[in-house]
Image: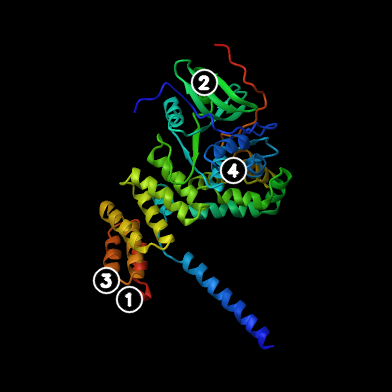
Amino acid sequence: MARTRRLIAFFVAACVSFAGLVQSAGATGLISAEQVAASVGLRTAADRRAQVLVTLERADVSAALAERGVSLDEAKARVAALTDAEATQLATEIDKAPAGASELIGTVVIVLVILLFTDILGYTHIFPFIHPAR
Amino acid sequence: MDLPHRAELIATPFFPQTEYRCGPAALATALGAVGMVAAPTTLADEVFLPARGGSLQTEMLAGARRHGAVATLIPGTLEAVLREVAAGHAVIVLQNLGLSFAPLWHYAVVVGYDIGASELVMRSGTTQRAVMPLRTFEHTWARSGFWAFAALPPGELPVTAQAAAVVEAAVGFERSATPAQALRVYESAAKRWPDDLTLAIGLGNAAYAIGDKRRAADVFRTAAERHDSGAAWVNLATVLMELGQKNDATAAARRALADPQWAPRASEWLARPDVLH
């Protein structure tokens, strides 16, 4: 019994001290380089990123992403790795999406998965390259 | 600096692409060139969009970061690409091998050039040593908007990169890096651009994050005095407070009140209970 209690106490102490570490790291109150960079240009980049994440969470959107081979976790990880400037750009695309029900989903998914930033991706397998005539 | 007439990074590994996966293959090649091992199949999960059969440019940058490399866009000039190669940096480029109205997008890695022969050497597609006339390359590259980047280990910067691109790269890298890695990036960048406020703030934050509060305070103080930036004054105040220098900290925070952008933050700081009492 005493041993059990000691074990519990140990775990609680470990958890509390860990929580303390996490909190002190999160609550440094220092202004980050990213915030300073954003203050030079646009504001509230964090809000814009949150907006993108909320959009991902929508059942219809995540289902549409899954249909295209991108899991919700993977989509979130991708968004997390974007810079504020990039996330803001993505949020702007979402804002531009028409508001009609199925059209909205279609547009959001197209924006997220396909158009991301209008200029895109590599799909080639015609190789070796054939020199253009000039 | 004069550009050598020819250069080739022959040690750059080669990962032939499978199907449409030139993005992951190019990324694996560039990461391998700087000794970072990442399998194209792993990268494919991160940067490849199965339904679309390709990788987005932004995700190529993010993918490099997630594997510990700093992905920095370089200027869209042939000279910049050649200079990077001459400096030992492989360059990932996006080409449009089709026509503007029928695009055929392709990522490749530039690893060499020969000005005399007017040729570029690339790891591209399924060809380990693809040689392309400079002129042809320029046309295919122009159709992608001259998009190119270098993926380098923290502490090393592309020789041709501009400050804005390096700020963007450092801030992006920091999101998924350890404080020690972020510190190396900001150190190298702030050394090259000592007058850049954002880089100084990043350097101070990174020093703080590894626990070097005195250095953080020095960096913030220098930046605050040089730019009279409210953000730097507030950060200086926070660090000085933690170092037990309450009077200096309060004085620093008051300086921030003059900067309209950060004045609210400074007022908030001055209203902290530990400052008031």
- Identify the residue at image location x=63%, y=44%: B46
Q: Which residue is mark 2?
A: B139
Quadrant occupied by the N terminus of chain B: top left
Q: CA distance from mark 2 to mark 4?
A: 32 Å
**Which of label 3 and label 1 is nearer to you?**
3
Q: What residue would you read off at disc 1?
A: B276
Q: CA distance from mark 3 to mark 1?
A: 11 Å
Q: Do the CB atoms of the residues marked 3 and 2 lie less than 8 Å apart?
A: no
Query: What label does residue A84 carry, if any?
Result: none
Which residue: 44% across, 19% down?
Answer: B115
Mark 3 vs mark 4, foreground winner is 4
The answer for how far apart the CA atoms under marks 1 and 4 are is: 53 Å
Q: Position of residue A21 (x, y in %)?
A: 50, 69
The amino acid beneath tag 4 is Val
Residue type pointed to by label 2: His
Q: Are marks 1 and 4 on the same chain?
A: yes
Q: Position of residue B36 (x, y in %)?
A: 56, 43
Type of amino acid under label 3: Asn
Residue B205 versus residue B134 in the image, above or below: below
